[in-house]
Image (cartoon, rainbow, N blue to C red):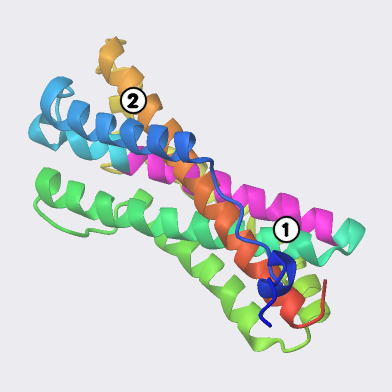
Amino acid sequence: MATDTPASVASPHPAAPTFPAPFRWLLFAWMCGVIVLAFFVVPNAQGLGPLTPILYFHVPMAWNGGVGLILSAVYSFLYLKNRRIADDAKAMAAAELGLLYCVLATITGSIWARGAWGLWWNWDPKQSSIVMLILIYGAYFALRSSVESRPTRATLSAAYALLAVITVPLLMYILPYYLKGLHPYPVVGASERGESMMDSRMRMLLFGSALGFLGLYVWMFRMRVAVGRMEDRREGLE
């Protein structure tokens, strides 16, 4: 005679935590609104013309990419302090998504450069520094893949992440700013004469887009952590 199988037996691993359906639909609607406003409603920025919509995707992805890499260092510190495998899984997920956002920011920046400067790539200080940052965090994942022992891998990766995070503000903001390349920093601030190059609608859309990309980051982060923890349970590490 057939018997009902308890859910805990039928599915030994819990479902990946995610946003409740209302929040997922809100995030979807939010990002759709960003796209519509960027391309059809909000006016162009001074000096950018039809390239302006790229601003609302390139800049938020760069901002959130930096946040993700810093978050990876925070979880790495927590791992070294408490030796919890879960913190290492979160550090890896944060770094993965931070690196993904940095790569997407680089791609959109290249599209922007093609329209503004006529070249896809010209080794502007901002472009050069983001490539260096991508290589540094690419080495982080190379290190993880080269160590077989999970505790050793977690310890070495955490130490590396704490050193690598020093380069995030240095390469994303400090060096490119002082080297004064072609990158249009005044777009989100003010011109040399002190005049704002963005009106209030443009600023609201820029920060609204950043908030939307942050929501996407959190959603993907939660799912990636859940997958990592299921892998650890399978290996008997949790």
Q: Are circles 2 and 1 on residues that touch, CB within 8 Å?
A: no
* Residue type, label 2: Val
Gap between marks 2 and 1 measured at Cα: 30 Å
Vertically, is 67 above or below 38?
below
Residue at x-position 22% and y-position 35%:
35
- Which residue in the structure is indicated by mark 2? 188
Vertically, is 23 above or below 153?
above
Q: Which residues are magenta?
A: 58-79
Please identify the residue farthest to the right as the structure is shown. Answer: 82
Indicate the quadrant containing the N terminus: top left, top right, bottom left or bottom right.
bottom right
Is residue 63 visible to the viewer in this orientation of the structure?
no
Expressed as whole percent of the image width and height from the top left, the position of residue 233 reads 76, 75
Q: Secondary structure at mark 2?
A: helix
Residue 78 lies within the magenta run: yes
Vertically, is 193 above or below 220?
above
Residue at x-position 34% and y-position 31%:
30
Residue at x-position 69% and y-position 69%:
13
Vertically, is 235 above or below 90?
below
- Label number found at residue 162: 1
Residue at x-position 82% and y-position 71%:
238
Is residue 182 visible to the viewer in this orientation of the structure?
yes
Secondary structure predominantly adopted by residues drawn in magenta: helix
Quick check: 231 left or right of 126? Answer: right
